[in-house]
Image: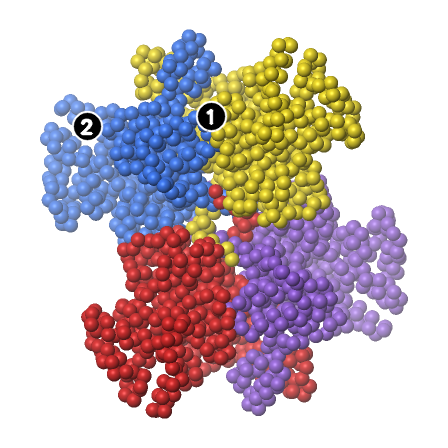
Chain colours: A red, B purple, C blue, D yellow
Amino acid sequence: MAETTINRAYFSGLLQSVADRGRALVRVKRAEPLGVEALLGLAVKLLRGRGEASGAATASAILGGYAALGPRERRAWLVGAATRFGPDFEALAAAARAFLEAPDDAKAAELSDRAEPTRQELIRRLNHAPGGTLALVRMREDILDATREDAPLHALDRDFLHLFASWFNRGFLVLRRIDWSTPANILEKIIRYEAVHAISGWEELRRRLEPPDRRLYAFFHPALDDEPLIFVEVALTTAIPVAIQPLLASERTPLAPAAATTAVFYSISNAQRGLQGVSFGNFLIKQVVEDLRREWPRLQNFVTLSPAPGFAAWLARQRADETSSLLSHEARRALAFTDHAGWSTKAAAAEAVARAIPPLAAHYYLHARTPSGRVLDPVARFHLGNGARLERLNPRGDLSNTGLDQSLGLMVNYLYDLDHIEENHESYANRGEIAASPAVRKLAPSPGSVVARKKKGA
Amino acid sequence: MAETTINRAYFSGLLQSVADRGRALVRVKRAEPLGVEALLGLAVKLLRGRGEASGAATASAILGGYAALGPRERRAWLVGAATRFGPDFEALAAAARAFLEAPDDAKAAELSDRAEPTRQELIRRLNHAPGGTLALVRMREDILDATREDAPLHALDRDFLHLFASWFNRGFLVLRRIDWSTPANILEKIIRYEAVHAISGWEELRRRLEPPDRRLYAFFHPALDDEPLIFVEVALTTAIPVAIQPLLASERTPLAPAAATTAVFYSISNAQRGLQGVSFGNFLIKQVVEDLRREWPRLQNFVTLSPAPGFAAWLARQRADETSSLLSHEARRALAFTDHAGWSTKAAAAEAVARAIPPLAAHYYLHARTPSGRVLDPVARFHLGNGARLERLNPRGDLSNTGLDQSLGLMVNYLYDLDHIEENHESYANRGEIAASPAVRKLAPSPGSVVARKKKGA
Amino acid sequence: MAETTINRAYFSGLLQSVADRGRALVRVKRAEPLGVEALLGLAVKLLRGRGEASGAATASAILGGYAALGPRERRAWLVGAATRFGPDFEALAAAARAFLEAPDDAKAAELSDRAEPTRQELIRRLNHAPGGTLALVRMREDILDATREDAPLHALDRDFLHLFASWFNRGFLVLRRIDWSTPANILEKIIRYEAVHAISGWEELRRRLEPPDRRLYAFFHPALDDEPLIFVEVALTTAIPVAIQPLLASERTPLAPAAATTAVFYSISNAQRGLQGVSFGNFLIKQVVEDLRREWPRLQNFVTLSPAPGFAAWLARQRADETSSLLSHEARRALAFTDHAGWSTKAAAAEAVARAIPPLAAHYYLHARTPSGRVLDPVARFHLGNGARLERLNPRGDLSNTGLDQSLGLMVNYLYDLDHIEENHESYANRGEIAASPAVRKLAPSPGSVVARKKKGA
Amino acid sequence: MAETTINRAYFSGLLQSVADRGRALVRVKRAEPLGVEALLGLAVKLLRGRGEASGAATASAILGGYAALGPRERRAWLVGAATRFGPDFEALAAAARAFLEAPDDAKAAELSDRAEPTRQELIRRLNHAPGGTLALVRMREDILDATREDAPLHALDRDFLHLFASWFNRGFLVLRRIDWSTPANILEKIIRYEAVHAISGWEELRRRLEPPDRRLYAFFHPALDDEPLIFVEVALTTAIPVAIQPLLASERTPLAPAAATTAVFYSISNAQRGLQGVSFGNFLIKQVVEDLRREWPRLQNFVTLSPAPGFAAWLARQRADETSSLLSHEARRALAFTDHAGWSTKAAAAEAVARAIPPLAAHYYLHARTPSGRVLDPVARFHLGNGARLERLNPRGDLSNTGLDQSLGLMVNYLYDLDHIEENHESYANRGEIAASPAVRKLAPSPGSVVARKKKGA
């Protein structure tokens, strides 16, 4: 019988009240809805008070009133808040001059104080409302939608991001395993938020949670109790997988976890658009690697099975560039198959494409760069930046329509080797060097020369 | 039978992992202790990385290493961190000039970025360590101790305070009732941290927790699980109390809470010195007022029974000023009794003093001010600033040695009337007007004139 | 903010270990399965020991081994246990003779001891296994299936029932509300076990849980943690409902609970066949009535909307009895419509049937009896036995195929009026009197005479 | 970071409602107390109903009323319940005759039914009251106190014990570790209930809970939430200890648990007198052995350090028997020292006694028996019956006054070797053979002969 230390139980109740506060917001009823100006007036009032007297109630009224606005009014309120609660330019200018005259720590501090826009204090005080944190995360979704059009919102967005990065510090995040006995209201969010390999319904969800060789972990924040922030899906296997469909097959014989040697991270999804720019994925993967390793010491490999979202587009550009020496005659012929629907189901075509892709993919990852010198593939940037190594290229990794569209079926494995993560990360961050397995490296051996040649040709 | 919604139970486990992370720090073992320079080197490393790769481990090593240092080395490390990780003065100057040239939102934002010292990022990354938040709160205790001597630490202290104010936002605090079935390791902290009316041991603690007419509430933060931040002790009574000793008497017949009309806040204690400057008390009192009112609708009065810590010293100054017209001949004679030890136990002397004090106390609260115009009494500043009203002066409120020393026995009641809190607060904050009951006001009726006269006399 | 007393949190961890023990059983692996005789041998061993030394392990081995048997072997094991571990007839006979000779308390006690079959001790010791309770509940399902054929199993079944009635004493049951944030593995059991109005899937389940005017409550037992024992579904409404379909409609505007006057128990399902004969429903309804009343003081009516499972069959018998004077000519004509499929969708037929049914239904409930004198309808027996009153007859209550088949659409409301429950129950239990509303009573006014006449006719 | 499966959290709330029910009982207020006869009348009513209608309320009234009675009235009520609610002698006699005529399973079952006294049903229904289980455990304390004088209560006590043995089946017990963060109201019960080595106060309690080499485990029952049933105190050491005082010393350097090789059970206390006769200790020790072994695989020895409560008395009888050949001349001389107070502090005396005791103690344990053939020492009966082996005799094990009084300082170690527990238990249970280490056995080599000789001499 597992015996639990009693002190654990004590804290287990702590979050209950946070949750209650969160739900309380929903119950606030307004006799008549407030307009944009009234709500901006409340913001002034909220900022003016010492903040405590009736602060939480005022904050609730603002957030509740905002939620009841239509999209246009919301935007008006946001623009109003962005423009009216900026820093005091005069005071800031005075502080700037004082610092320039005789720079020292105290004057820098004064400058920092003056440079902080009132908006940040507004956001902090709005957070006093029960359920305020969630309401603010939702508000930032509106801001992100609107920033393209309303320039002043960029400043407001910056303030939100600044505070969210502070509030959602990794030290405050809690890792939880999600399984088939997790509350349904959380599970339905997993279904909704899964962004990589869509979950069609409850039965498919169960297949990703219940078998003993499947795991799903999420980060939570105490103030956002039933909202996962980010989650990762894991399969325990006996080998590094080359394709996603067998992993997700509805008829599978599950593996006994004790027999597994490999943990595969086959899907990572951010669940809160309003927290865009606050980075969790890196912490999540590493925490899960550590936890799995402790639970199943036999596990040796920690790899992803990842999409290659930019590959097909890049390849199309290469094919369109008739001068490109990157594509051999044979490769061009093979790729021509892919112009015809259904190619992947025809053995010969599929075979030819699968042969053609690996060296091209190796080039795509190892040598192709954006004009500013960045790796092209966003998924690669994430994992390489985390210190993972590009381990293997799987030309028939994802034969779904999405997979064929974005990468002609290519999926790749990134390897998380805790012993080399740090040096990989440093080499990548400081010198742009890409960690790759010898096998991958061999496929695109003369990067310099190829690229050089190509450049000459251009 | 109380029935519980099941979803509550889910979140109740959330904090467990936070707690585990906290305890994990303790277990970190160091082969050999690191010195000040090595630990500053680790800080450089922590800041250099993208922060995630080995960040939490590095942060742990720094915090563990710091905890193992002696006081002198700790101070050296803090000064090192304060001076080496300040803002980049050149970049800041450039941003200042750019802003002054053509002030706009974007340049103000850039200025804000440049003005933020690297120290803040260091603190944020140290918080990634398991148990980091508590370690940082403890570290700030060291800083507070050292700021008197080491000027550079003021800047570092400012950075800590800035982040703590953000992290300990009221929206993240959790109110818990503490009672006789609270874990012992938390109860012993209540004994230790009680700052107003000392708790002599477990039996006295029980008397403050277990009777049905006694309550103790505390704020907790999810990342500091078994550390109360602030707590308030409450007695339920049938009248506004005039003295503390009967409330704390060891032999009492408890009152049935349903019969109570009055809730008395007789002690408020901050429990974390490292959070000095982050204000919780105001939120705590108002939350407890709301909760009590919901639980016991019969409760009508919410008052404090508070010390008057500056009164005796102020009175001594009045007595020393022979020209002061504030003290009548009779009052001077009565106060002369207090120069003799044991005066409070002699009926005639005690009686005379008790008669002399109220008008003087009324003057002390209503009209006396610091040179900068603030109310003299720190406890009064706190409650008046919260919007409470000075309700009654109790000349025999606290006959303990401490009470006699600091206020000749005076205690006062502040009244929290939720309907007037806001206007009281605003009048006080904006116009310096002090909310007081008519009875108190009548005791010092002609403030202007008295003060005016006195000023003329000077 | 709801504030929780901290002591609650403590016990919240208690059941965790019970749950762990329960799951542990599943993990027990057997190198090779044991046969029936070997498992009966283990039972002897389990009974012989003082029971503690290796008791839990032996019990686990038996329960695990039993679970691995096929149906035929299971039955053989059960018969073996039933016949080999009965009481000692000789000792029992001796005790019986001793008691008959000189009856006294001590001899009665001795007789009681001797009469208890060893089987009960076997069951008690099997319960020592982790997860034993659930395994025993499952084992009783097998027994119930087999009792029809294997007479000796009746005795064994009696022993199980005796112990279950003791273990599942109402004092040990826990009422929990089930809602949309309940763990999915419990929710799927609700879907599976709903016996009255089938739940088609997760979306329909959500409609019964999530709207504010819908509730679902279940009893749990600490040792069967994620297995509901019985549950009831409740709708909050503004009137006593006359039909089930509108209650279950997929498109509904939910009612604000504070506006409701009526709580409708529209489905009660036993979830554990293995606990057949241990009665929970009565406790459940009354507990829920009390809890709802406390939560929503405006609620005035607590009624069921219940099926009439025996009505169609009884009516068919009446129609077949051509001499029955119960059926008027008009009624016979109306009922003739029901012989044709689709009658309920034809206005005239439906109308005629709906007019004909109420007086017949009133007779069915008020006067019809089994040969042994019991009320015919099993649902009526349950609610009347609980002290409810037959409130209203709804001829178009359930127009689903099931509803038409079993009762020509009839549903009835039983009223739980806490003020009269006890006297209703006593009248029914002691004198067979049926509590019915005046309206129902008026529909079948002369029971005696009608029945009398019919009897004469027979 | 420890990651928790979410489903655990769900059940963690289950017990809360049980706890609430328990506390509810306390709040029941009676306008005027009921007398003995009225309370017996309520019992009749409780038994008459189908038990559900108003059952829980009636049960509450009885238990609340009983608790308000004085000792004499309580006894009267108990005797009334014992005598009025016995079995129906006539019906029982009829069943007995029927069985004797033609014994079969069904008739035995009928006999069993009739032999069960109504008292058991009364107790079962009383348990329906919120908090009923605890009230019944307290009621049995009264019964135990009274049985010496009131013979009819023996039957009632038997009924309580029968039901308690069923309700407190080991399958329903939960093991919890008690530590310094356990709720204070539970800790104070540990202080109060410790029966072997008294705990003087909170500081001593802390010394038994907080150091990493100290553990305290207790069994709880879900319906008795904050009442431990039995608890055991454990010290982790590097050797089998020879004396208790060093273990309990207030100044000790704690051992790192990972360095420990031995777990010492140095105190086992039953906490509920009302559960006398329901055996938990055996289960507790074995569960703790298993849990410790899993947590600290290095642990090799699981031993007790136990008192020898009957030794001094037995030895006094041997000394009084001048014909006893058991005591050598030398031994008699050494034991004569013990007739003088303070002997244990005099080196020569203490030395002589310590030399004399072991062979006598070996005889006491291995060969001395009660007239009915049982081992004399009750602690020995408990551990030997559990399958432990008598490992070592420590003549200077407990030099406290209690220790000197009851055993001249002797303490013994019993060894729990899981590999031999079962065979030890069986040998002891079936053949009365005592498992003892070779060292102990060598000290009393010729049991037969000694005893034989002694018998001849008698």
- Foreground residue, B91 or C72? C72
Camera sees residue B250: yes
Q: Quadrant of residue A354?
A: bottom left
Tell me the residue at 21%/73% (across/down): A349
Tell me the residue at 60%/35% (across/down): D304
What chain letter is assigned to the residue under label 1? Answer: D
Camera sees residue C290: no
Residue B429 placement, left or right of C225: right
- The numbered disc on residue D115 is none
Classify mark 1: residues with Cα within 10 Å, few (<14), some (14-19) or many (20+).
some
Q: Which residue is mark 2?
A: C450
Question: Does C370 sit above or below residue B221?
Answer: above
Residue B178: x and y in percent read: 60, 50
- Foreground residue, C99 or D382? D382
Tell me the residue at 33%/49% (across/down): C188
Question: Does D206 sit above or below residue A371?
Answer: above
- Foreground residue, A209 or D41? A209
Classify mark 2: residues with Cα within 10 Å, few (<14), some (14-19) or many (20+).
some
Residue C180: x and y in percent read: 38, 53
Residue A44 placement, left or right of C386: right
The three-letter amino acid code for the residue at tag 2 is Val
Residue B175: x and y in percent read: 57, 55
Q: Which residue is mark 1?
A: D162
Residue D450: x and y in percent read: 62, 17
